[in-house]
Amino acid sequence: MNIQKYLSVAPEIAEAIQAGKPVVALESTILSHGMPYPENWEFSHKVEEIIRGEGAIPATTAIIGGKLKVGLSAEELELMCKDPTVGKVSRRDVAVYLATGKTGATTVATTMMLAEMAGIKVFATGGIGGVHRGAETTFDISADLQELANTGVAVVCAGAKSLLDIPKTLEYLETMGVPVLGMGTDDFPAFYCRKSGCKVDANVPDAATAAKILRTKWDLGLKGGFVIANPIPAEYELDFNEMEGVINKALEAAKAEGIHGKDTTPFLLAHIKDYTKGVSLASNLQLAYNNARTAARIAIEYSKL
Ligand code: PSU
Ligand code: MN
């Protein structure tokens, strides 16, 4: 193995990791394929400021110029937000992008990989990928779930969008031994909505308790990560039934256009945004800020253990 040949960690982040200070990883697919420009650019800076405001250090990840980048410059953030040729990189794509020098945005799966390589334990995002509706015929199951099973990083998210099959996603995580913790909730959140109708494995009251659970799992040498499900703040929540209508319309459009594979999730996200005239984007931004705040607090508590 020769990871160091490819890994490029920003000096501030490398020093913080070395000193055991709190660091929070952030993904770039949410920028390149999950939000439009310029809202994604504004988001990319604000989410980092929020993490700093809490007292932790942000580390946005990407693949640029044959390097696994942990911590992006302002120019690199802009590239991820603006350049339409930036690819969506999952685990299977990493070696191709590195070896050919292509620019790639990291998904939840690849951000977890880079975080683990760098020594970062906590990662904040919007929503995780999961088992798609109809997976019994398409086999479409996000690589995020296998990564959660194998890679030791806690992913703070607002649950999963109900464009996925949430009950099947939770079944898969159970089979793979991935703990699903709810921050102050018994219910697994459905991204825009605080409740999905499914339960989490444990309702965790605060960041200190979450950090203690992470420490305990990894002290035991148990492989894999965590889903830390953090419901969207109530004031930004959208109506479940209304969103079901929107999601179903997007799923029908995907079917009509024959969208499949890695294009499915970005296609659905873009259509949901269009159908809701940007209301869903505003909620998306707020839930991701909220996750960044919670992740920073968990990283800070974890650094004390
Ligand atoms: N879900 C969202 N927003 C996103 C994604 C998922 O609500 O931006 C992105 C994440 O990067 C996630 C990826 O890891 O899509 C999952 O893609 P796929 O379903 O192709 O594995
Ligand atoms: Mn897929």
Image (tube, rainbow, N blue to C red):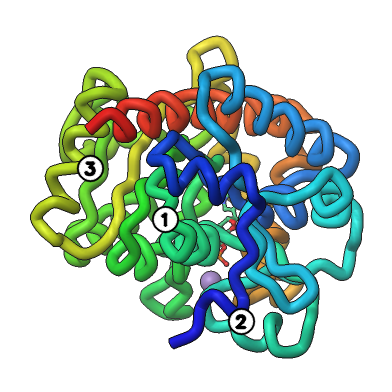
Residue 177, how many percent across, how many down?
Answer: 17, 60
Q: Is residue 281 above or below residue 14?
A: above
Note whether residue 247 is visible.
no
Residue at 43% over, 87% down: 1
Residue 300, how many percent across, how many down?
Answer: 38, 27
Q: Cβ–Cβ below 8 Å for labels 2 and 3?
A: no
Residue farthest to the top, as pictured: 235
Residue neighbourhood size for the residue with mark 3, other residues' Cα within 10 Å, grouped as few (<14), some (14–19), many (≥20):
many
Q: How many marks?
A: 3
Foreground tag (3 vs 1): 1
Residue at 22% over, 33% down: 305
**Residue 98 placement: quadrant:** bottom right
Question: Which residue position is annotated with label 3?
Answer: 214
Question: Which residue position is annotated with label 1?
Answer: 119
Foreground tag (2 vs 3): 3
Which of the two residues, 255 or 54, is positioned nearer the viewer here?
54
Note whether residue 167 is visible.
yes
Residue neighbourhood size for the residue with mark 2, other residues' Cα within 10 Å, grouped as few (<14), some (14–19), many (≥20):
some
Question: What's the distance in space between the residues labelled 2 and 1, CA to CA?
Answer: 22 Å
Q: Amino acid at mark 3?
A: Leu
Q: Amino acid at mark 1?
A: Gly
Label 3 residue SS = helix
Label 1 residue SS = loop
Residue neighbourhood size for the residue with mark 1, other residues' Cα within 10 Å, grouped as few (<14), some (14–19), many (≥20):
some
Residue at 30% over, 55% down: 225
Q: Counting residues from the N terminus, which is met first, the one under dot 2 or under dot 3?
A: 2
Ligand 1 in which quarter: bottom right
Label 2 residue SS = helix
